Amino acid sequence: MKLLVDTHLLIWSTTNPSKLSESARKMLTDGENEYYFSSASVWEIAIKRRKHPDDMPMSAAAARQLFEEVGCIELPVLSRHSAEVENLPAIHADPFDRMLVAQARLEGMKLLTHDGIIPEYGDFVIKV
């Protein structure tokens, strides 16, 4: 299964795995899955680190490198992903989460998240 992993789960899995639920650990260690990170997640980390450096455990560049080192494949933000955001219902206000939803939906991926609101977008979202 192709899994697009949300930003929080990416950070927790690489810096503080104890924050992951048991179901998240199982999903993220299943050798049958392909794991992707969105370039939007790296952008989100850059913005949040600039605003609140104490709340973000790593720089965007370090995060990108670490995500690749653990075997995640980068999913670039394409213009068709950006256009798809406009078609999403106004369930979630966070622009980064909306981009991940649009990407997963268009790419036929499952979106792995801990967010309680995002699953309202459809059965392609897996809450762990």
Image: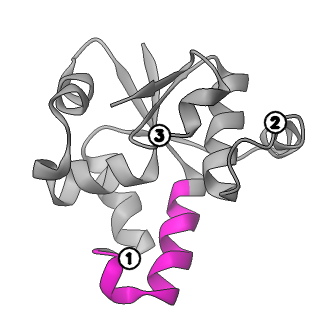
The kind of residue tagged 2 is Pro
The image quadrant of residue 24 is top left
Few, some or many C-alpha atoms within 10 Å of disc 1 (few <14, some 14-19, many ≥20)?
some
Q: CA distance from mark 3 to mark 1?
A: 26 Å
Residue type highlighted by circle 3:
Gly
Query: In the figure, residue 127 lies in which quadrant?
Result: top left
**Residue at 68%, 24% in the rendered image:** 105
Give the magenta range. Answer: 41-57
Disc on res. 49: none
Looking at the picture, tell me which residue is in the foreground, 70 or 100.
100
Residue type, mark 1 in image: Ser
Disc marking residue 59: 1
CA neighbours of label 3 inside 10 A, class few (<14), some (14 to 19), many (20+): few
Residue 40, compared with residue 30, is above or below; it is below
Q: Position of residue 71 (x, y in %)?
A: 30, 38
The overriding secondary structure of the stretch rendered in magenta is helix
Q: Secondary structure at mark 3?
A: loop
Mark 2 and mark 1 lie on one chain; the one further toward the N terminus is 1
Q: Residue 63 in the image: state x and y as whole percent.
A: 36, 63
For the residues bearing labels 2 and 1, Cβ distance under 8 angstroms: no
Magenta region includes residue 42: yes
Mark in front: 2 vs 1 = 2
Q: Secondary structure at mark 2?
A: loop
Q: CA distance from mark 2 to mark 3?
A: 16 Å
* Displayed quadrant of residue 73: top left
- Residue under circle 2? 89
Picture residue at 25% right of the left edge, 54% below the top = 12
Residue behind mark 3: 116
